[in-house]
Amino acid sequence: VIPHSPSRMRMAVLVGRIHVGCSGRESSQFASGRAPTTDACAHFPFGKQNVFSQVLTVRTERYQIVSCPVHITGDRYLRNYLLFNVALVFAVDVAVAPFEPVVRKLASVLRSLEIEIGYIVGDGKHQLEAVLHSVRDELNRAGRADVPINVANTLRLQVAAQHEECPLVELHEVAVPLCNLRELPREQLDWAIAELIPHINGANYAKAIAERSEVHVAIVLKALRCLATRGLVAIVPPFQFHSLYLVTREVGRLLVDPKLQHECEIFTHFGPQARLSASALFELYCDFTPRHAYWTVADFTERHDCIKLGVDVRRFIYFGVIHRLLRKVARHPIRDTAGALKDMKEVDIESFERVETSVPGEILEGKHTTDQICCEVEISIRQLGELLDSDPYTHFFYR
């Protein structure tokens, strides 16, 4: 979402000191590009305390001004404070939302430089206009800017493309890479994301990624959500051969969408065999129909001999879930503890106590899925199934 045509490009980058006593007008303005006059902005409330460090978008008849006023206190300043405004100026028809984080970061960096070395009111002000020119030119050209400020500091800005925000990631969910994450430039990656990449392989769930990377689980969940929002990974339920899946009405797209057909053929294939055609893959997906409650992935692979067909079952299932051709059927256990206690004389005490000690009763209330329970108590889906299936007071419903 970076406008490249001359009529839609960013027009100017501004940094200006504000004197509240002069009706909010700016002085000592450093500009890069064609900027509106200071009089055009004079009546906007940049000097109000409740807008400091907030991103403001002001729309005039000809311009859009995305700005972030900054306030610094100190006895070296006139009136013991410095108030300046950082702004990007756009044509009136440009979508400015992707540039708000850029303005916020530019303001934050300049604030830090001013506090540390007096960059705006000291000697650095002579370099500021050149820095702004470079910021404007590089953002217009590539949507990102790496501009040296001095020997110790480099300004890095990037306009992030707008994506639909991914839902919150849960501990039991799996991140499936949609590209080669190891080829991403490491200098452009957040530290936490760089630590996680070696462990994102389509098999590790979020909690396991946190444990193996030794990164706090809350940071891992946010990092995975960020990667999913940018379209670098897909967040899906964990794959198990005991899982249940159903085909959806979206499967019809596999017959009419050439791009989807090509992606499916490549993504699901493995081994020396020739790739299956899209029509053959369509027939395989259609086999996930509700025959009975126990038609699992294991039953599917036994029926079709996927190894001989050259189909990677895990990737086949993941592709279907990512593109909404399949949906996973969640299994929710409910335990009737009251009924067990009522019939205690007839209950197998050993079996009853085994369930009680292995799985906390509060997560067998029907709200948790078997995937969530396995992640929380750290047992396999097979162990959980054997444990609960043998308990006459545990029942399941499917959703």
Image (cartoon, rainbow, N blue to C red):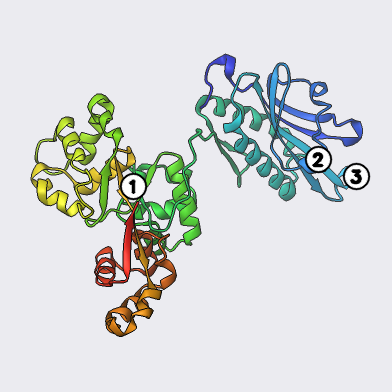
- For image coordinates 52% across by 20% down, the residue present is 4
- Residue 257 at what x, y percent from top left? 27, 25
Amino acid type shown at disc 3: Arg
Give the crowd class for mark 1: few <14, some 14-19, many >=20 residues within 10 Å.
many
| Relative horizontal placement of residue 293, taking residue 208 as reference (left or right) | left
- Residue 157 at what x, y percent from top left? 57, 37
Near-viewer residue (310 or 374)? 374
* Residue named by callout 3: 79
- For image coordinates 35% across by 42% down, the residue present is 183
Which of the two discs, 2 and 1, labels the residue nearer the N terminus? Answer: 2
Tell me the CA gap for discs 2 and 1. 47 Å
Tell me the CA gap for discs 1 and 3. 56 Å
Q: Which mark is residue 83?
A: 2
Amino acid type shown at disc 1: Val
One can see residue 122 in this view: no
Q: Which mark is residue 167?
A: none
Give the crowd class for mark 3: few <14, some 14-19, many >=20 residues within 10 Å.
few
Query: Label 2's element?
Result: strand
Amino acid type shown at disc 2: Leu
- For image coordinates 15% across by 52% down, the residue present is 299
Query: Label 3's element?
Result: helix
Which corner quadrant of the image does residue 79 belong to?
top right
Near-viewer residue (240 or 122)? 240
Tell me the CA gap for discs 2 and 3. 10 Å
* Residue named by callout 1: 176
- Residue 328 at what x, y percent from top left? 31, 48
Which corner quadrant of the image does residue 95 belong to?
top right
Give the crowd class for mark 2: few <14, some 14-19, many >=20 residues within 10 Å.
some
| Relative horizontal placement of residue 168, taking residue 20 as reference (left or right) | left
Q: Please say if 224 is above or below 61.
A: below
Q: Please say if 398 is above or below 290.
A: below
